[in-house]
Amino acid sequence: MSISLIAKDIKESATLLINEKAAILRAKGEPLIHLGGGEPKSKAPLSAILAANAIINSGEVRYAPADGIPELKAAIIRYTEDYYKIKVAPENVIASSGAKQALMIALMAVLNPQDEVIFPAPYWVSYSEMVKMIGAVPVPVLPEDGSFYPRIEDIERYITSYTKVIMLNSPNNPTGAVYSRQFIKDVVELTQKRGIYLIMDDIYHRLVFDGVEWVNVFDYAKELTDNTKVVIINGVSKQYAMTGFRIGWAVANKKLIEVMRILQGHQTSGPSVVMQKAAVGALNGPQSQVDALRVSLQNNCQVMMERLGAFNGVRANRPDGSFYVFVDFSYYEKDSRKLANFLLDKVRVATVPGVDFGLEGHLRLSTCGSIKDITEGLERIKWAVDPDSPNELFIGMRKLVRDWL
Ligand code: PMP
Ligand code: GLU
């Protein structure tokens, strides 16, 4: 079969793959613990469900403007004006099929083949592949000091005449790092000076833990004008536990949004109208569920960090937000895919290999499950990788692992 050179070079999404593997094992009745998935387990808000039901029940679900129904745009404008303290017009907004599509069309709108996109590593698995899908060049930047907090010098070093975009994700998937005020300020100044785009993937911005400051990029970019080269990406997936609804959005200068609208018109004709209504329900409905999610993630993270502390050989940075902990397991195994497969096969714990986020030797663990999932999942991992750990609970399983080895 003849496959394009670009398509051949694209890796499957490791995060989606682990969800599929987990679903298959669960369907077979396997006692799986899913520490891989990046999605909250709570239900979607009632206001979202009612809004989707209402339009379905009307039986009238038609094509709509490719950049989103006016009601959703109005809700996104309110949201953006509240959180970013800027003035936003409908022409500054596009709703897409997930933040993923919003990001993809933003990149398509600005990149030529061979252009370069800089983003801090470790990074969400799709960043590198999205850039490659356009024929452009991903430039992941691992902070030199070994931390998950890039400094402006780290980024500056990689700027070339091909650099078109810097892309930031704070809180970060997979590390949970929230970038500092100084760093955001420096990046805004750098992108303004160089005339390059700054894409802020803020999909986890309401899931920041107590005592941590999330920084609004418009504290420094100031206002959204026709010349502003800042793009905000967000969506309902994470904050409202609406991953399967597939609604995200971008806010940017009018010209860029117009180009994105044209691209999206040819791709999907716009996101599902039913799901756009649901997103309106979520954005305009009661908001207490978002903070409840944030607090429960913070508690889960605390428990996960405590349990990780009991391992002899792991290193884990305390996340500032999101629902991930990115853990260095290289003391036990340097090949993260091998380790993730081993854990899935032998102790039925799903994790995502760090190499897919651009950093080998690590596993991404999700805190989205219950406290029981976290404690038992880590217990099983510990026992599988740390053969000398005293543990009476999983004798049978340990035997299984040893037999396998
Ligand atoms: N950005 C980041 C950093 C993510 O982790 C995700 C994963 N869902 C997305 C964007 C895309 O979100 P969605 O398409 O579900 O809105
Ligand atoms: N973003 C989620 C994660 O990192 C899963 C969905 C996806 O990658 O598209 O686990």
Image: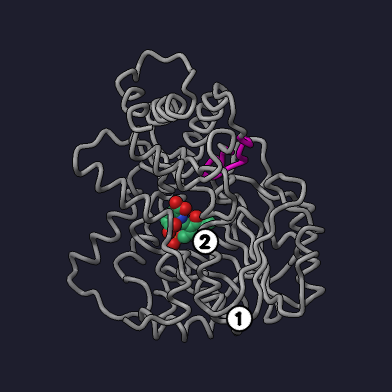
The x, y position of residue 366, in whole percent, is: 46, 41
In the image, taking residue 124 as reference, residue 370 lies left or right, namely: left
Report the residue at 28% width, 61% height from top. 52
Q: Is mark 1 within 8 Å of ligand 1?
A: no
The residue shown at (40%, 46%) is 37
Residue at horizontal 67%, vertical 72%?
165
Residue 249 horizontal/vertical position (percent):
49, 67
Residue 77 seen in render = yes
Give coordinates of residue 76: x percent, y percent.
50, 65
Magenta-highlighted residues: 316-328
Cα distance, mark 2 to mark 1?
A: 18 Å
Q: Which residue is mark 1?
A: 110
What's under tag 1, amino acid-wise?
Val
| Residue 348 picture quarter | top left
The amino acid type found where label 2 is placed reads Asn
| Figure disc tally | 2
| Dot 2 beta carbon under 8 Å from ligand 1 | no
Callout in the foreground (2, 1):
1
Residue 237 seen in the current view:
no
Residue situated in front as seen by the camera: 351 or 109: 351
Q: Nearer the viewer, residue 169 or 161?
A: 161
Disc nearer the start of the sequence (2/1)? 1
Disc number placed over residue 4 in the picture, else none: none
In the rendered structure, does residue 326 fall within the stretch colored magenta?
yes
Secondary element under disc 1, as helix, strand or loop, is helix
Q: Residue beneath label 2, please?
A: 234
The percent coordinates of residue 396 (x first, y second) are: 29, 20
* Visual colour scheme: one colour
Which quadrant holds the N terminus? bottom left
**Residue 256 image-quadrant placement:** bottom right
Q: Left or right: 340 with respect to 30?
A: right
**Callout 2: helix, strand or loop?**
strand
